[in-house]
Image (tube, grey):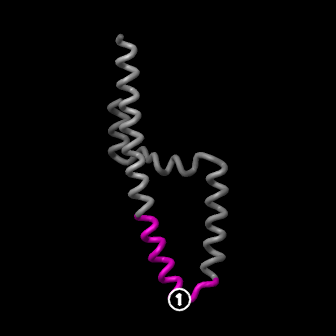
Amino acid sequence: MKNMIKELWHGNIIPQEDSRTNSKEMKELLGYMARHHEDLEKTFTDEQKEIFEKFHDCWDEYVSLAEAAIFEYAFRLGARLAIEVQKDSEE
């Protein structure tokens, strides 16, 4: 357990990256999104491109914060479940 915690701390385990690429459906969806993004950008004026880039920066920051909150919640939930299972097995 200690090794896994150290690996997580040092950035060798990156749950958010692993979870994004683990399914065929998610990979396909990312491909569609990239294609639509490129098609949409081709139609933009320079001003619209700048606004869209700012939107993306905000969206990326939001997603990062949301992923961190979800990770923290899921980690705590998993720890509580492990404690409950341990208590049940001791009884």
Q: Position of residue 31 (x, y in %)?
A: 65, 62
Residue indicated by mark 1: 46
Q: Magenta segment: does it hold 60?
A: yes
> Which residue is painted at 37% across and 19% down in the image?
86
Question: Residue 5 appears in which quarter of the rendering?
Answer: top left
Name the residue furthest top: 91
> Which residue is painted at 40% across and 28% down in the image?
81
Q: Which residues are magenta?
A: 43-61
Considering depth in this image, is 54 or 27 the residue closer to the camera?
54
Q: Position of residue 43 (x, y in %)?
A: 63, 84
Looking at the rendered structure, the kind of residue marked 1 is: Asp
The C terminus, quarter of image: top left
Vertical relation: 42 (above or below) 1: below
Give the left or right position of residue 39, taking residue 82 as reference.
Answer: right
Give the left or right position of residue 46, taking residue 73 as reference.
Answer: right
Give the left or right position of residue 17, taking residue 71 as reference.
Answer: right
Q: Main secondary structure of the magenta part?
A: helix
Vertical relation: 15 (above or below) 85: below
Q: How many marks?
A: 1
* Secondary-structure class at tag 1: helix
Q: Position of residue 41 (x, y in %)?
A: 60, 79
Circle 1: is it few (<14), some (14-19), or many (20+) Cα within 10 Å? few
Q: Magenta segment: does it hold 66?
A: no
> Which residue is painted at 35% across and 33% down in the image?
3
Vertical relation: 85 (above or below) 91: below
The N terminus, quarter of image: top left
Considering depth in this image, is 15 or 67 the residue closer to the camera?
67
